[in-house]
Amino acid sequence: MPKTPHVDANAGLIADYAHQLRFGDLPAAVVHQCRRTIVDTFGCALGAMGAEPAKIARDMAMRVSMPAGARIIGTDHRTLPELAAFANGVMVRYLDSNDAYPGGGGHPSDTISAILAVADANGADGQAVVTAIALAYEVYYALWAATSLRDKGMDNVFYTTVAGAVGAAKVLGLDRARVAETVSLSVIPNVSLDATRYGNMSLWKGCAGGNGARNGVFAALLAQAGMTGPEKPFSGNHGLEALAGRFALQPFAEGGRAFRIAETTLKCFASEGHSLSPITAALELSRQIAADDIRDVTVYTYRFAWDVIGREPEKWRPTTRESADHSMPYVVAAALIDGSFGDEVFSPERLKDPRIRTLMDKIAVKEDPELTRRFPDRLPCRIEIVSHSGERKIATTDYPRGHYRNPMSDGEIENKFRSYAKRRLPAERIAPALAALWKID
């Protein structure tokens, strides 16, 4: 594969792959997985339209009217593509129900709002969109696997920005040199801090991915207009490697290697990705013991999950939706009490529910070194409950529903879409919407 001159190796690798990838290179299974992901992504967006951050983002985007611009989901309003990417991205991300890479890789479908905004404003067809999505997932995964920025205090929405920018550049039909400039213009200005996801979380937790998509669109549009960026965004003096350490991207999908979009989790619950196994185990236990009979609960998990959603004191008294869906004790308590799990559990009323608070005080979250050893190939969890009579109940989970090794069916994805779409769409419009999304290509 020819190399793009005057850029560092990693930026050149991305630019070369982005430029040469074609729709015809995508196996049928990859195209179908893109369809599944688009259905899931639009459902998440419709479900979050009424949320406060979505309203704020939508109002910000609707300050600008642009007849040839990009539409905001749920409206006929056209605005600047970068503002549409932000508004739509916030809706996609807010419920914490869009897809994720198991192992702490974040949410690659955050890139879709960037791709769709550029495609809408430029009249691109569905095959261009699907190709750009498959490409964005490749770039996102490669950056995450090579850098692990979260371990260094940086937010994984950085991957959204770069991958979304490359996907947008693909839709725009930029040449190799312009794609390389897009990479530089997305990398250099957009390193985000992971403080977004710790402590008592703010509304921004659900908006950072949309902001990453916005910045990605802006980078691609700048490159299209002729803007140049530093030649070595990764390896140059004070480039990303100064923060992340030296790294090399693994090869992208070609020559028979599987596309990374096939390795995502499409979430069965609207909650942080590492809470899916604990919720699953708690629901199993809820059928074996009444919440009022519980004396104490111990959740055994792997270190990453313990650090992100099971360690801080705020996890035992979340005061915002953003904190609650990143609280292992909260979601486990709610599942044990309700015997079911939906995002209504994050309502202001439920956050003050004395039954949940009482049960949370009986929950301990502990790292199990054996479970840490199994991660990230598995997302293991073991919950042990002791009743007031001393009886012990145990449930374990390795692959929650939606994990690529325990995938949701197309029907389950449709049901998820319907459950969210009915919040915004008349019943008679849901089936036609689904039919259109399944034929995106």
Image (cartoon, rainbow, N blue to C red):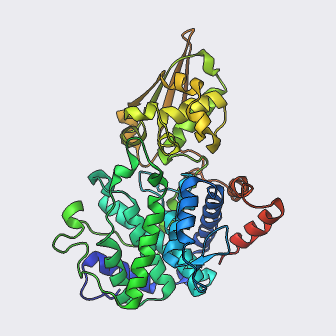
Q: With 380 as the anchor, is 73 left or right in this view?
A: right
In the rendered view, tell whether residue 433 sits above or below residue 441. Answer: above
Which residue, as the protein is rendered here, is positioned at the far right? 428
Total numbered badges shown on the rendered structure: 0
Frontmost residue, 320 versus 375: 320
Q: Quadrant of the N terminus?
A: bottom left
Where residue 266 sits: x, y (%)? 58, 55
- Residue at 53% in and 40% down: 277
- Whether residue 254 is visible, yes or no, is no
- Whether residue 329 is visible, yes or no, is yes
Which residue, as the protein is rendered here, is positioned at the far left? 237
Which residue, as the protein is rendered here, is positioned at the far top? 389
Frontmost residue, 65 versus 392: 65
Where residue 211 sits: x, y (%)? 44, 65
Where residue 306 sits: x, y (%)? 39, 37
Q: Quadrant of the C terminus?
A: bottom right
- Residue at 51% in and 28% down: 383
In the rendered view, tell whether residue 378 sits above or below residue 98. Answer: above
Q: Quadrant of residue 404?
A: bottom right
- Residue at 60% in and 53% down: 51
Frontmost residue, 136 versus 362: 362
In the rendered view, tell whether residue 436 sits above or below residue 400. Answer: below
Q: Quadrant of residue 166?
A: bottom left
Where residue 209 sits: x, y (%)? 46, 61
In the rendered view, tell whether residue 223 sits above or below residue 154. Answer: below
Which residue, as the protein is rendered here, is positioned at the far front? 63
Frontmost residue, 202 versus 26: 202
Q: With 78 as the anchor, is 106 left or right in this view?
A: left
- Residue at 29% in and 75% down: 10
